[in-house]
Image: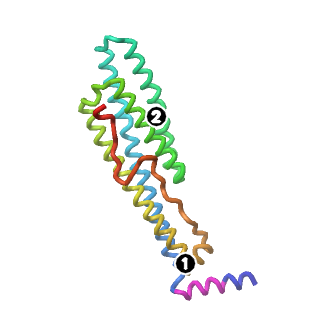
């Protein structure tokens, strides 16, 4: 009896303009590709972090040879060391989250890296004001800003794909096929606080 009812429901879905199964699969693949693009953009930003740390350390080495106030120089280095450790930890967690593929975990790791970069840069510039004027640091500002824009675009494209997918599986008769095939609503990607479609990166210029 249950088998007969299932066959009748499936037959009804097929008779009402097709079951939509193939389209569900296409949209599902589209969202997965868009999610992968977010991962690529995030990993590209991750790869800039060692260059950033190296640039700050270079400035620290220079300051060590010119600072008359040794205690102040040492205090600045200690503060930077603490934030560098946090930055590297969040970077590693993001790589692991991207590999795992869970959107909520990627979101959380993305937000942690964003906060860590901001904290690290603020403390580095505060400790070494001349850092802003160096060519390497200025180049990294541009690269980080570009990577943030790429991440924002990838987030937007993913959310558009998710919206299309979610809307489609709620339509009739596709909703019947979606339920029978186990297709479920996907969660959009929530950007870190203060991020927008075209984010700008404030490295403390003018402070």
Classify mark 1: helix, strand or loop. helix
Q: Residue at x 53, y 50 (%)?
A: 100
Farthest right residue in view = 1
Per the image, the residue denoted by label 1 is 174
- 113 up-or-down from 157: above or below: above
Task: Please tell me whether residue 13 belongs to the stretch shown in magenta.
Answer: yes
Placement of the N terminus among the 4 image quadrants: bottom right
Placement of the C terminus among the 4 image quadrants: top left
Measured as percent of width and height from the top left, residue 188 is found at: 49, 59
Q: Residue at x 49, y 35 (%)?
A: 89
Q: Residue at x 30, y 25 (%)?
A: 129
- The mark found on residue 88 in the picture is 2
Q: Is 129 situated left or right of 34 in this image?
A: left
* Earlier sequence position, callout 2 versus callout 1: 2
Measured as percent of width and height from the top left, residue 72 is found at: 38, 15
Name the image colouring: rainbow
Measured as percent of width and height from the top left, residue 132 is found at: 28, 31
Classify mark 2: residues with Cα within 10 Å, few (<14), some (14-19) or many (20+): some
Task: Please tell me whether residue 11 belongs to the stretch shown in magenta.
Answer: yes
Classify mark 2: helix, strand or loop. helix
Magenta part of the chain: 7-16
- 66 up-or-down from 174: above or below: above
């Amino acid at each position: 009896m249950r088998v007969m009812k299932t066959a009748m429901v499936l037959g009804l879905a097929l008779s009402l303009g097709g079951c939509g199964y193939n389209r569900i699969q296409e949209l599902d693949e589209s969202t997965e590709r868009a999610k992968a693009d977010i991962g690529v953009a995030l990993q590209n930003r991750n790869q800039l972090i060692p260059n950033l740390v190296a640039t700050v350390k270079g400035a620290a080495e220079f300051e060590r040879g010119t600072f008359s106030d040794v205690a102040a120089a040492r205090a600045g280095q200690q503060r930077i060391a603490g934030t560098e450790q946090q930055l590297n930890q969040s970077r590693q967690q993001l790589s692991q989250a991207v590999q795992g593929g869970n959107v909520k975990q990627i979101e959380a790791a993305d937000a942690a890296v964003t906060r860590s970069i901001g904290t690290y840069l603020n403390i580095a510039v505060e400790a070494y004001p001349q850092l802003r004027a160096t060519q390497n640091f200025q180049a990294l500002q541009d690269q980080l800003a570009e990577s943030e824009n790429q991440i924002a675009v990838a987030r937007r494209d993913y959310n558009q794909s998710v919206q299309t997918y979610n809307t489609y599986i709620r339509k009739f008769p596709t909703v019947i096929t979606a339920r029978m095939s186990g297709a479920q609503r996907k969660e959009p990607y929530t950007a870190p606080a203060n991020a927008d479609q075209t984010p700008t990166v404030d490295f403390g210029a003018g402070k």
